[in-house]
Image (tube, rainbow, N blue to C red):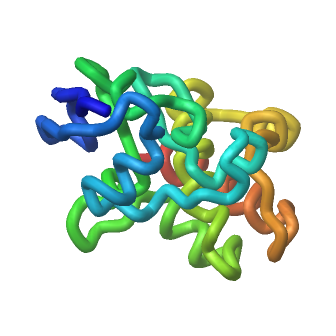
Amino acid sequence: MAGVAVSTTINGDAVEYLCQPDETLLEVLRDRLGLTGAKEGCGTGDCGACSVIVDGRLVCSCLVLGAEAEGRKVETIEGMAHGDQLHPLQQKFLEHAALQCGVCTPGFLIAAKDLLEKNPSPTEEEIRFGLAGNLCRCTGYDKIVRAVQDAANVMKGA
């Protein structure tokens, strides 16, 4: 199969890569670009572990072809922190012990970031709804919801 040349923006940086027509964005991010934060949990878009933001829309990167990123803006977990300065969501996940094995954590963080960008003052119900596409097998969801609530309060005050 012939490769597809793609020019895109990932975490604010212009990126070019060559991928196969049937290669997923998740595979491109992890295997071609070394951005291993997004995880493959299910490969069917049911768990949210591979969540990224494409042109302001939360998507499961296992369901998007790498070639579809042409001309788009992609945000991954690697773009959340600024150097050693963690994003408030990352800091609150640590403070609230809202992670254990870490497989789901990048997807939850990206989904929470997307939620708070669209709704800076979500209710608990809105947080749970906004994160409903992400599954955790270790911590349960209460600590995650509390971390997002706390981060929202910090971000509003910043």
User: Nearest the camera: 32 or 123?
Assistant: 32
Q: Quadrant of the N terminus?
A: top left
Please say if 6 is above or below 35: above
User: Nearest the camera: 25 or 144?
Assistant: 25
At 79% from the left and 63% from the top, the residue drawn is 136
At 47% from the left and 47% from the top, the residue drawn is 26
Give the image location of residue 20, x and y in percent.
34, 36
At 38% from the left and 29% from the top, the residue drawn is 21
Give the image location of residue 91, x and y in percent.
49, 69
At 84% from the left and 61% from the top, the residue drawn is 141
Quadrant for residue 51, please give it.
top right
Give the image location of residue 33, x and y in percent.
26, 55
Quadrant for residue 151, please give it.
bottom right
49 lies left or right of 87? right
Q: Could you tell me if residue 151 is visible in this image?
A: no
114 lies left or right of 21? right
Give the image location of residue 49, x and y in percent.
63, 54
User: Nearest the camera: 3 or 140?
Assistant: 3
User: Nearest the camera: 85 or 157?
Assistant: 85
- Farthest residue to the front: give it: 1
85 lies left or right of 150? left
31 lies left or right of 156? left
Please say if 51 is above or below 70: below
